[in-house]
Each structure stands twice: as structure tokens, then as C-alpha cells.
Image (spheres, helix red, strand yellow):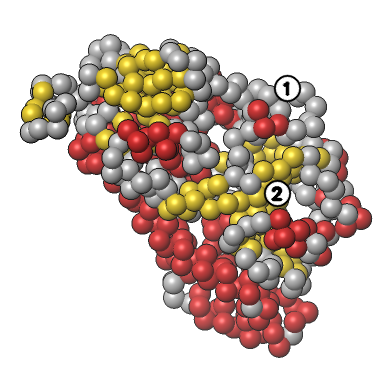
Amino acid sequence: MKTTPVKAASGGTRRLHPVPLELVDGSRIGVVGGGPAGSFFTFFLLTMAESIGLELAVDVYEPRFFCHRGPAGCNHCGGIVSESLVQMLAAEGINLPPTVVQQGIDSYVLHTDQGEVRIRAPRDEKRIAAVYRGNGPRESEPIDIVGFDRHLLDLATGSGVTVVRKLVRELSWRDRRPRVTSTDGSSEDYDLVVIAAGVNSQLLTLFRDATPGFQAPTTQRTFICEFRLGADTVREWFGPSMHVFLLDLPRLEFAAIIPKGDFVTLCLLGHNLDDPLVESFFDSPEFRRCFPGSVVPRPACHCYPRINVGAAVRPFADRMVCVGDSGVARLYKDGIGSAYRTAKAAARAAVFHGISADDFERHFWPACRSLDRDNSIAKVIFGITHLIQRSRVLRRGVVRMTAREQARTGAPGPMSSILWDTFTGSAPYRDVMLRALSPGFPVTLLWNVIAGNLSPGSTRQEPEPTDGR
């Protein structure tokens, strides 16, 4: 039997109490947050527990129904499910129905001041899914869709999970077990509490107060907004493509437009992102040309959410663990995929090993550390991307090389595949870096930089037409 050290109330010496730090029949688990991380955790927890005949009781604290339009159902996300995650979910038996997927993405268009180029999916398959996290943006019409978060939570509740529609205001301890207190004053004690609320929640402060040694993730401000254009206009002007921008704007790191039914979603990342940076991007000719008449419409809604850009320190303790971006997430991309990976690792640790801090450190944290190490490589990749954004000479070479690859049939060229996986998050950053360091790639890129700048017109490629453009 595992034991846990407990400090005497008087502050004296520590003694060991024979309290089991493992899940047994009838154990109660509280999951705070019903977004992807919380739903993935409960799905895997109950699936794994069933495989060994373990009966558990799970409560998910989530006040939102994810069936409201606008902020009430929003989860502050661009809503892209990467190609690799679509495949992994299918292997787990989690399929995304048409009511969840708003748009299949089969290409993306790279916009620069040196031209535009459309990059096809490596296998010519519509594997990337654009989804709503709630029931659509503010000002949208009531539509017959199921948001991604609601779909996952429905899968969890179908396994016997109880959804508690309350906000959590406090995490504390009672008889060496975590206690969850809601804003209505009610409290419940659990054998394990899982924090899956994300970095835009105040719950990380509660977790820090309850678990000394925890430090919250480093975050960065982003900008997300929705433009209502109508389905016909979205089809004509954006098609089944994500639109990515490499522009020489101070402090801008990444920008993308994602089509979704009647709307398109704009995501901006930047250093000290603020209103002036957003306005300078809105004024750029490359962005304005994406809209009819080069007129950018008024956003239907917008927000400045924060994202995880640096892993938390020790996001686990006896009987407590953080999953999703409460702990670690892939840098800039595939946040839903990070939720999947960390939630599955935490569930496996809890079911097959135990729920002590040591169990989570041994069997959960390695998966998080792997993501964090890959993010170190990502910082180098995005540093190089930043150099390309700042250099017209390099931009010409990249656009020329990509356009020439896309003009050929067959397997995608190295630049196309590197850009695809960098901007969509469909492969680990380590794989992207290895391809960039492969023999021949730097030489080919250098040749295209030279040729593109000797003949600047050769870099331009008009994107293939969409349905009506």
C-alpha cells in the first residue's frame, strides 16, 4: 500500500499515514473544465478503467453548455484540428461527424508581399478540420451544428460522467483529499482532482495555492476575431484553404484566416500584441485583398485570449494534476492535440500506476517534457520564420521555391512539406527541423534565393481559383 507524508497540525515532525494513493473501485474523480483536455481525460480514464474492471465515479465541472453563440460558448481558439490528430482520434474510435466539422482544409495559401502561392495537402486529402468550439460566433444564425467541445463532452457523458454546471471558486484539502468548492458554497471531496481549465482561467491560481511548488505556464497574448461574410462569399474568396501571412510588420509573428461556413476566423500572434498591431495588419494590402473590394468588414466578435508558450513547473501533486495547456502545449499550434496527448498520459498514469506526485512525475510528466523539448526546436524554427518575414530577399526565395514545387505533380517538395507542417502543426517540430537540415535543402533554397532576386517576377504565382474566384 502506498503512503503519503502528512505534516502535523502543530507544524512538528512529518509522519506517514497509510492512505492509498491509487484508484480503487468507487474512487471519485473531479475534473475541473469540460473542454477538450477534460473530456479527453475522462474518456481515456473510463476506457482504461473498464479494461481492468475498475469502476469509477467522475464529475466534470463545466458551467458552459457549448451550445450558445458568441462568448457564452466560446473557448478562445482558432478551431483547427490537425491532420495527425484527426487520424489519432479515428484510431481511438472518436470520429468527427459532419455536424462538427465546418470546413475540410485541403490546402493553404501563403500570402507575402512577393506573391501568393497555394500549397496542397501532402496527400491531397481533406484531413484538417476547421471546427467551432461552441455553437458559432456572435451574430451567427442559430444553426444545426454541434461544437467540437460539446461533441467531446457528450462522448464523456455517454460513458457515465456527471456534468456539474457550476463554477469552481476554491480548491482545498480535507482529510488529505482534495476538496472542490463551487460558487454556490457546495463542496465535494475527491480521490483525484484534474485541472483542465486552460490558461485563461483563474483556476491555476487556486491550484498554485493548493499545491506549493507549482508555477503556472508562461503565456502570450493573441488576437482572434470572426468575420461574417456568408457561405457563398467564403467559398468564392477563401475556398477550402487556410490562408497564412508572412508580412514584414513589427512585432507580428503569425497570422492566419480559417474558413468556417458563413464566417472566417482570423488568428494573430505577436510580441506585445495590441490594438495598433492589429490595425496595422488590417491595413496591409495582402490582408485586404482577401476580401471583396479589398474592404475588411467589421468583426462580428473578437477577443485577446492568452496561450501557453512555456511549460508549467510541476503541474502535479498527490491526488492532483493539470492537463492540456494548464501544464504544457505545443508552441503556437495544435493546442487540441496537446490536450489529447497530456490527458491520455495522465489517465494512463492514474489507472495503471497511481495518483501520487511520484506516479505523475514518472508516468505523466515524460509526455509533457517531450512536448516541451519539441517546443525548444520550435523556437528555432519560428526564429528562422521571423528572419524570413523581415527579409524581402529571403521571402522571394521561399515563394519561388514553393511555387516551383507546387507546379510539379507527384510528392510535395521539401519546402512545401516543411511549410505545411510548420503552419498546420501536423508533425513534430523535430521532424520539420530534420527535413530542413537534410542534404540538398539548404543548397536548393540558396539557389532559389539567388534566382528569385535576379528575376523578382519569377517568385509570383497566382493561387489556383476556388469555386468562383
Secondary structure of the residue carrying numbered label 2? strand
The N terminus: image quadrant: top left
Q: Quadrant of residue 271?
A: bottom right
Residue drawn at x 50%, y 36% is: 201
Q: Residues within 10 Å of mark 2 (few under 14, many from 20)?
A: many
Q: Quadrant of residue 449?
A: bottom right
Judging by the rendered image, the residue that carries numbered circle 1 is 144
Residue drawn at x 38%, y 21% is: 180
Asked whether 132 or 138 is in front, the reply is 138
Asked whether 122 or 86 is in front, the reply is 86
Counting from the top left corner in percent of width and height, residue 55 is at 30, 13
Counting from the top left corner in percent of width and height, residue 405 is at 64, 68
Counting from the top left corner in percent of width and height, residue 81 is at 57, 41
The correct choice, above or below, for 419 with respect to 55 in the image is: below
The type of residue carrying mark 1 is: Asp
The correct choice, above or below, for 246 with respect to 360 in the image is: below
Q: Residues within 10 Å of mark 1 (few under 14, many from 20)?
A: few
Estimate the spatial distance between the alpha carbons at disc 1 and disc 2, rounded to whole Å.
23 Å
Judging by the rendered image, the residue that carries numbered circle 2 is 266
The type of residue carrying mark 2 is: Leu
Counting from the top left corner in percent of width and height, residue 57 is at 35, 14
Q: Quadrant of residue 130?
A: top right
Secondary structure of the residue carrying numbered label 1? loop
Q: Is residue 180 left or right of residue 263?
A: left
